[in-house]
Image (cartoon, helix red, strand yellow):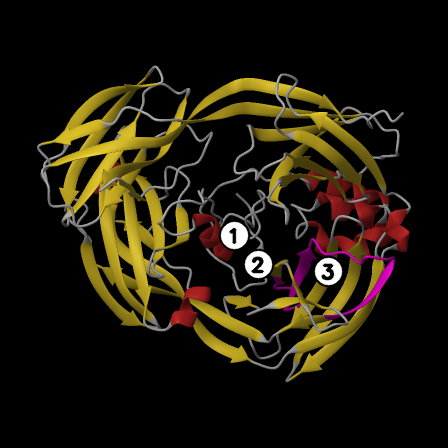
Amino acid sequence: MNHTEKKLSHHLKNDADISYPDFNAMWDQIAQDQERCPELHSSAGSGKVPRRLKWKKTVLIGTAAVILMATPVYAAVHYNWLDLLDHRSGIQTAIQNGLGQKLNQSVSIKGVTLTLDTAFSDDNRTVILYTLNPGKYKGDTLRFPSIGLRDETGKLIEGRYYHDFNRTDGEYKGYFETEWTPSGNEANVDFTVSGIQVLAPEEQEIDLDISQRHSQMFDIHKDGLGKLAVSVFNEKDDQVMLSTSLTFDQSEVRDYAFPYLKIYDQKGQTIEWIAPSISGKPGVNGEYLSEQFYNLDTLKQQASSYVLAYHKEEGTMDQSLDISIRLDKTEMLSGTSKRVLNLPLEKQSDGVLVKEAIITPTQIRVTLAQDKAILQLPYLKYDLDVNGTQLEGAVWPSEDSKQMELRFEVDPGLKINPDTPMTLYAHHKVDYVEGDFEPVTLSGISEKPQVVDTNLGGFIIHWTYYLKDGDLYVERYSDDPHFGGMNQTFMLLKGERSYGMPVKTQFAGDGDNQGIDRYEKYTSDTAVVYPWMYSTEEPEGKTVVPIVEEKRD
């Protein structure tokens, strides 16, 4: 898939009044960047990692070619930023239009030089382009333990960063992005990087038997890694899920190891996943959990060796790289406007409102709001038609739990003024159904998988249950594609709900409605489980909202 192919991202769900771990908080640790730009690193400590989810990339080759042919000076100055910003077309637009605050400030420590090139600060975000010459600190991957802006009070403003190595000049080209923006037109801040860390790929072969139903344990105890547990789950359509749990002998290694299973065939080629895979889901006791999906026949016929692939530390420079800058967003404000909307997302609903739109030269941000916390939005996909140009939206959380944000990168060449027609399109309707559902009785529980079918909301649900390693596993799915999935099950123990621990991460809209829960140390041969909540999907469902300011008396 191009330069972003080998980078990683993740998601999950949560409910506040249950006793198992807070999954929203867990995922905040993993993927602060929840838009579909998964190659970004968060300033909290993510690094450059193998990519699992094959999201769509915006193709900019044609646009770049036109720009380069038309403006050779532009090409000479800005060529190195084009591919780097392939998921930030709004910043490309600003560069194309000659916007951006030139900084050209550098700092050098121990032969490492950090240079700030250009800043883009408007009412939606701040983006800073940088170059890093690593000096003697060379390796496969270079990461920043932390990066951010420090304001005049000393508060660290966190964000995300991404950089690529330019082999021609031996430097890293990158950008830092944060939702923070100066409250006024200008602000004094320090751009700070807390040193650098050089990582190298490493592999540890494991003797994995995919025909084994019980969990298989492997003592790694190398480079700060601890014990690895691998569990094999056979799914429908000849698909297999390899679920892994890894502990760490050194807790700090979790921040940069990015471990995952890698499978080689007889020719030494990597066997690819057949579905998006998940890495880095935190376990209850701090384990690093992953889920990888393969074709079972392919593994049986072609798999030659299994390895745990990860990154190890090869070198560090602990000194901080700090540059004082004065951000000025005056130039960007000339193309900035705001539309107060307060329009219902759905005409027959008093739920989510399209509250407002903030339009800057690089990005259009639409805020959705309701009078209670937004746990899920009623649609999965959002597009914005801007005078005939379609922009694809990304859903972002807001600091206000009663709001969510839709962010749209402005395409190069797109001209927007305060009166430009805009229409929001929401696609793929999802409804979440809660209630007191009929329980399901699971009898004759043993290590042999048992099957039972039930009816839930008009959908036939196929249940499979069995014991593995002394734990009860409860699987369920429906053949009906309009059944979105059952997020979780629970039992009643002395009148209190005891929730099963989700083993498989579920995504709305991915066509896979199977879920798996685990109940630890289960000794009875009978269980009564209750569905907690399920979803229904209408891929063809949509709603249309003109982005027109509300009328004021």
Q: Residue at position x 49%, y 41% from top?
A: 54
The correct choice, above or below, for 221 with respect to 268 in the image is below
Residue 62 appears in which quarter of the rendering?
A: top right
Tell me residue 428's x, y (percent).
54, 24
Q: Earlier in the sequence, mark 1 or mark 3?
A: 1
Amino acid type at circle 1 is Ala
Q: Quadrant of residue 61?
A: top right
For label 2, the SS is strand
Residue at the (57%, 42%) spot, across then down: 36
Where disc 3 sits, the SS reads: strand
The boundaries of the magenta stretch are 165-190
Where does label 3 land, which residue? 129
Badge 3 amino acid: Leu
Q: Is residue 234 visible from the viewing direction of this image?
A: no
Label 1 Cα crowd, 10 Å radius (few <14 / some 14-19 / many 20+): many
Q: Are marks 2 and 3 in contact (CB under 8 Å)?
A: no
Residue flagged by tag 2: what amino acid is it?
Ser
Is 453 colored magenta in this rendering?
no
Question: For the residues marked 2 and 1, what is the alpha-carbon distance in whole angstroms?
Answer: 7 Å
Q: Pinpoint residue 419: horizontal percent, then vertical percent.
A: 88, 29
Depth check, front residue: 435 or 174: 435
